[in-house]
């Protein structure tokens, strides 16, 4: 079955760029109908949708984060990635990648990657 | 922007109890609401989609109802493995999660 796995640095300095990659296994990232998503969870808080990408490269971002994020896809590697620039301590969170099917149901999730923003 | 409220923020119940969680949207979202279960240190798991549809493989003691602005999530006969935080999520303009309800064993 389809599985997702996040990877990337666990520590990022303030003002730098957070970069994470999600590797999709057990299925193709190019399967029609699925969008590939980043969601984060601040410590002890609820979940926050960041944005998603379709295999064609079409993206949809949370408006309040749009100016700082880029989500990209590499179909040859079956991966998609998140870049969040100009990070602050407020970006410290567990970052999840997830598969979004129609009507925004997130049905498969990665295990999560903890990212701390600190000097 | 749509606001989501969820209540209660936490609850304690005994094994076998019926547990009910409510989620309210600040405006009509039709039935565009999903429910997730998140156990400590784990990723969320989709339980209910489109307000009332049970995700395949999810036990039938979980159910959802509602439409418009008011939604309910129910666990019939709480089991020890149901101890978790439950999140509602709407998808009107963009996905937005509720603050979560943590279910404890009494």
Image: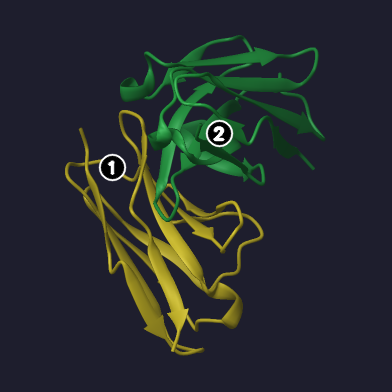
Q: Residue at x 60, y 69 (%)?
A: B59
1 and 2 marks in contact (CB < 8 Å): no
Q: Nearer the viewer, mark 1 or mark 2?
A: 2
Give the residue at mark 1: B30
Q: Which chain is green?
A: A
Q: Residue at x 31, y 66 (%)?
A: B9
Q: Quadrant of the N terminus of chain B?
A: top left
Q: Residue at x 55, y 52 (%)?
A: B44
B73 above or below A112?
below
* Quadrant in the rendering for residue B6: bottom left
* Residue B75 seen in the current view: no
Q: Residue at x 39, y 52 (%)?
A: A45
**Coordinates of residue B55 in the picture (x, y in percent):** 57, 54
Secondary structure of residue under mark 2: strand
* Residue A21 seen in the current view: yes
Quick one: which residue is furthest to the left in this view? B26
The tally of labels here is 2
Give the residue at mark 2: A100
Q: Quadrant of the C terminus of chain B?
A: bottom left
Instruction: State the hue of chain B.
Output: yellow
**Coordinates of residue A69 in the picture (x, y in percent):** 46, 17
**Coordinates of residue A13 in the picture (x, y in percent):** 52, 27
**Coordinates of residue B57 in the picture (x, y in percent):** 66, 60
């Amino acid at each position: 079955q389809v599985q997702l796995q996040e990877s990337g640095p666990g520590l990022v300095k303030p003002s730098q760029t957070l970069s994470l990659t999600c590797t999709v296994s057990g299925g193709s990232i190019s399967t029609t109908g699925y969008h590939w998503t980043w969601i984060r969870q601040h410590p002890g808080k609820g979940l926050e949708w960041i944005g998603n990408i379709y295999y064609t490269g079409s993206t949809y971002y949370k408006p309040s984060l749009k100016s700082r994020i880029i989500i990209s896809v590499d179909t040859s590697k079956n991966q998609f990635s998140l870049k969040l620039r100009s990070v602050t301590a407020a970006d410290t969170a567990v970052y999840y990648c997830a598969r979004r099917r129609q009507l925004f149901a997130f049905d498969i999730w990665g295990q999560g990657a903890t990212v701390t923003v600190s000097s | 922007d749509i606001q989501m409220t969820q209540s209660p923020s936490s609850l304690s119940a005994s094994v076998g109890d019926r547990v009910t969680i409510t989620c309210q949207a600040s405006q009509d979202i039709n039935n565009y609401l999903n429910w997730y279960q998140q156990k400590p240190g784990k990723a969320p798991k989709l339980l209910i989609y489109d307000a009332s549809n049970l995700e395949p493989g999810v036990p039938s003691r979980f159910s959802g109802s509602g439409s418009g602005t008011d939604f309910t999530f129910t666990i019939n006969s709480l089991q020890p493995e149901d101890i978790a935080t439950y999140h509602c999520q709407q998808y009107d303009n963009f996905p937005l999660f509720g603050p979560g309800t943590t279910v404890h064993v009494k």
